[in-house]
Image: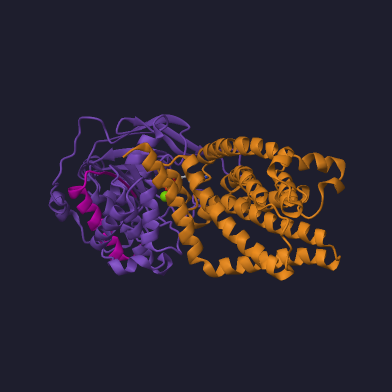
Chain colours: A orange, B purple
Amino acid sequence: MTLMTRELRASYAFVERNFNLTKRYWGWEVAFLVYAVAGALAVSLIGKDQGSDRLLLTLVIGAVFWNYLSVVFSFIAETVAWERWEGTLEYTFMAPVRRYTQMVGSTLFAVAYGLVHTVVVLAVLALFFELDLSRANFATGAVFMVLGSFSFIGIGIMTAILPLMYVERGAQMTFVLQSVLLLISGVYYSVDILPGWMQVLSHFSPATYVLEGVRAGLIDGTGIGDLFGDVWPLLIMGTVFIPLGVWLFGRAERYAKRTGKLKRVG
Amino acid sequence: MTGLLEQPKTDSAPQLSLPMAQRQARLRPIETDGVPALLAERVTKRFVVGRKRKPVVAVNDVSLRIPRGEIYGILGANGSGKSTLIRLVSTLLTLDAGRVEVFGHDIEREEMAVKRVINRVSVDAAFFKKLSPHENLTYAARLYGMDAGQAKRDAIEILARLGIGEKRLSRPLEQMSRGMQQKVAIARALLTSPTLLLLDEPTTGLDPRSKLDVQAFIEELRDTHDATIVLTTHDLDEAERLCDRIAVINDGRVVVEDTPDALKAKVAAERGLAPTLESAFMTYTGKSLDDDLGDDDKDDDDE
Ligand SMILES: Nc1ncnc2c1ncn2[C@@H]1O[C@H](COP(=O)(O)OP(=O)(O)O)[C@@H](O)[C@H]1O
Ligand SMILES: [Mg+2]
């Protein structure tokens, strides 16, 4: 058997496992979807209340795409926490699988899962508000979503380190990171209103560029060609964050193996 | 945990004069020359726990040489370092000192090669409890690059041998008893055809029936599979029944290593004690297997 087939099979192991887990916890998945839809609706209604169609669309896009990014991000970040909780972490880490392979598998599922989630939330919101998307450039939106996914996968992998290193509260720490990203990325407002130092931080969040790009595409119908200023930072972040994430993950794994942090009992 | 001390003594001295009769004759030989299945040289592992500055030396300067085909027992009280030793070999902990080779592959430099030939069963059967045995085993098999269909067929066969019927394999694992879960854990390990199988207290906490099933299965493995087995245990009867050789480990150190018969003969000849593993254990560790629970700081995060 070639190395390639072996690695692909191993990658698929994670996709299939996560699919099975999602299926088994379907009740929770429905509840989570309701939670996502309700949250997105509540925020978007502010736009309606203010009587501004532009604000409404801005908020809808913010809510929907933030939902996508945070679902992808937290799914990846939680894979380690989940395995720690079940006690399977040692078995996964003992298997002859490269971390890249493991991350590719976990990530593919997270992206697919995030897409399904997003389509549902977007559909509900579009129906609810009878959104006018006639001018929208969907290609632009899709390109930004794909580009942004890479960066968020990278950040997700880096965050997965926390539950690896901190046995007790690692999983909760991922929420902190998530809310900081929400704050600085201009999800519901323009980053221009932030204080100067926060605006500097906003340049390091991929979500800032994704949201700018998606809004320009869906609200104003701007083509991807005119948005290069938002594309190149995402290209750089995507190519840097994923290898960096895997590398850091490897370091954290070594640390965990040196200090005995992988085990749960026995 | 029921140790020998609490059990009625049925195996008194006369019977022990022909101990080999109790053990099944070996069907497959141990290959004493050639590359050992496991070679550990002066292995040490320390843990720094909490704010206490002084590290715990969990494994202290341990050297082992286990030939291919052997069932090697590591007998020790709680907190003596058995699991840590197993984890070091499983690449789940890094060595502080010393080196380990599995079939001639260095566990640090050739980690992937080692991972492919080992597998481990630990005292807690860790699974995705909402998933079925079948889903858990498919996941495990794929991680090892196996074909899922073949894995399924093998799993059915192994579990049937352990007394678990095929129709139980699609229901969530959490519905199974602990004994059954442990059998599924054994199937998970065997599925990948490991040539070095690490069993870390596989029968601890099981009901007597499951315990016997698992022990009988390990005996069967010895005769039918090309596997070398390292078995840690807490249970003197089990060690005696299953192991070709036994190392007694105390506070991270191997204090004595020999065949069960030789150990018993040794305490009888040197100290004039009853020729039992129990007296051997007491002699070399200065404790009985049962009075280790709860004293000192060693077992705080164990079971
Ligand atoms: N991951 C770990 N972190 C900190 N201390 C540990 C860890 N694993 C084991 N120890 C300590 O090392 C010693 C040996 O433990 P262990 O190998 O689990 O013993 P056994 O399996 O024989 O009961 C104990 O003092 C235990 O508390
Ligand atoms: Mg143990």
Residue drawn at 67 percent across, 66 percent down: A37
Residue found at the far front of this picture? A134
Q: Position of residue A45 (x, y in %)?
A: 79, 67
Towards the viewer: B104 or A25:
A25
Residue B205 visible in the snapshot: no
Q: Position of residue B45 (x, y in %)?
A: 47, 36
| Horizontal relation, residue A18 to residue B219: left or right | right
| Horizontal relation, residue A12 to residue A194: left or right | left
Residue drawn at 76 percent across, 53 percent down: A187
Establish if B116 lies above or below B278: above
Q: Position of residue B134 (x, y in %)?
A: 36, 61
Magenta-colored stretch includes residue A260: no
Residue drawn at 73 percent across, 52 percent down: A179
Towards the viewer: B75 or A207:
A207
Residue A224 visible in the snapshot: yes
Please name the predominant secondary structure of the magenta segment in the image.
helix
Residue drawn at 30 percent across, 54 percent down: B151
Towards the viewer: A96 or A38:
A38
| Horizontal relation, residue B38 to residue A265: left or right | left
Q: Position of residue A148 (x, y in %)?
A: 65, 45
Q: Quadrant of the N terminus of chain A?
A: top left
Report the number of discs: 0
Which span is picked out in magenta?
B205-232
Magenta-colored stretch includes residue B229: yes
